[in-house]
Image (cartoon, rainbow, N blue to C red):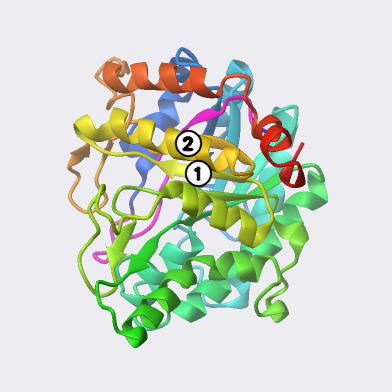
Amino acid sequence: MFKSFLMGGFECSTHKRKDGRRVDMLAATRHDELAERDYQQLQGLGIMSVRDGLRWHLIERRPHRYDWSTSLPMIRAAAQTGTEVIWDLCHYGWPNGLDIWSPSFVERFANFSRVAAEVISGEISGRRSYCPINEISFWAWGGGQVGYMNPCAVARGAELKRQLVRAFIAASDAIREVDPDACIIVAEPSVNITTGSEAITDIAEAERHRLYQFEAVDMLLGKQEPQLGGHPRVIDVVGMNFYPTNQWYHFGPGIPFGHHHFKSFADMVVETHERFDLPVFVAETGAEASSRPGWLHYISTQVEEAMHRGAPVKGICLYPVTAYPGWDNDRICETGVIGMAGPGGNRSLYEPLAAEIRRESLRFNGRSSSHLSIVDGPDHAFS
């Protein structure tokens, strides 16, 4: 499905913090000006497919008036280097003056997505891929339930989730109007929530919260609340965003990696595929500092197991693939295989992770998920 099984993701968040400051990770990491060099550096590691993003708030500063000067250099860099990009169209941020709770938000986002698809299809040949809205579930929680990020609401998480689902559906349909063969991806957090209690009510409550992770995709597919407009046509691939901190006790601390309550990621992959009967890929994963190589090895081993169990896994995306300044305190987070750009635009290579990328590329080279499915589970074969 993608040019390379191992992929790289560029942090492209554009939300506003509680203090009103807007985050712009493409500018903070200088990827917006260094895209061509960044793509070439990843290609040196065999990474030909990436996740990247457009900044809606910079493109549509006035309603229905679009300025592509901040995005065309990145789009053309992808075309010039032969890099395959999954384009995030809304990564937590939207234009100033637009009410996210209003019908206008859905309309404006659909129009923006349609024009974005026109621009991208005019510059890039071959099949193009889009993720209209990144992490609906996390945004609904962070922005609608606990007031952590824009729109900084409290106790409105369910309402925000449904509004984002409407916008995603409208965007998906708008993209396909101009790019019928586009691949539409949803990227959602994959989590495990459990309890140390043996009380039946506590176990049931933890499980109820765990299952919330599937709600947005169920809505997009029309399995829940079909009045929102969901339908199987809306998405083609389910992206799983999974980090070492994605497992915790209900109303308690995180579950340490290696603890007996830490759920196998292979089990999570298989559950996600079987629930939605769609191809999946690891849309975001990574660890920080010296944990980076070991974490990639763990994820790769778990993905290989899931593939042998019949799950059609299409790739693993290291995210973020560069170091980046933290959203809240600008601390440099050493999470990627390439570092922050120096004065001349050069990025250092973190060799331990680079070596692991090379090893894991050999693991998956020539072993597509469709091949594994045909060998190990013909009922799950996908082209």
Residue 196, image x, y percentages: 24, 72
Residue 167, image x, y percentages: 62, 66
Cα gap from disc 2 to disc 1, whole angstroms: 5 Å
Span colored in magenta = 2-22
Report the side of 45 relative to 336 (left or right): right
| 5 magenta-colored | yes
- Judge by depth and name the residue closer to the eye, 256 or 90: 256
Q: Is residue 38 visible?
A: no
Q: Amino acid at mark 1?
A: Ala
Residue at the location (79% across, 44% down)?
A: 179
Report the side of 209 relative to 293 (left or right): right
The quarter in which the N terminus is drawn is top right
The residue carrying mark 1 is 283
Q: Is residue 315 above or below residue 262?
A: above
Image disc number at residue 208: none
The residue carrying mark 2 is 317
**Is disc 2 placed on a helix, strand or loop?**
strand
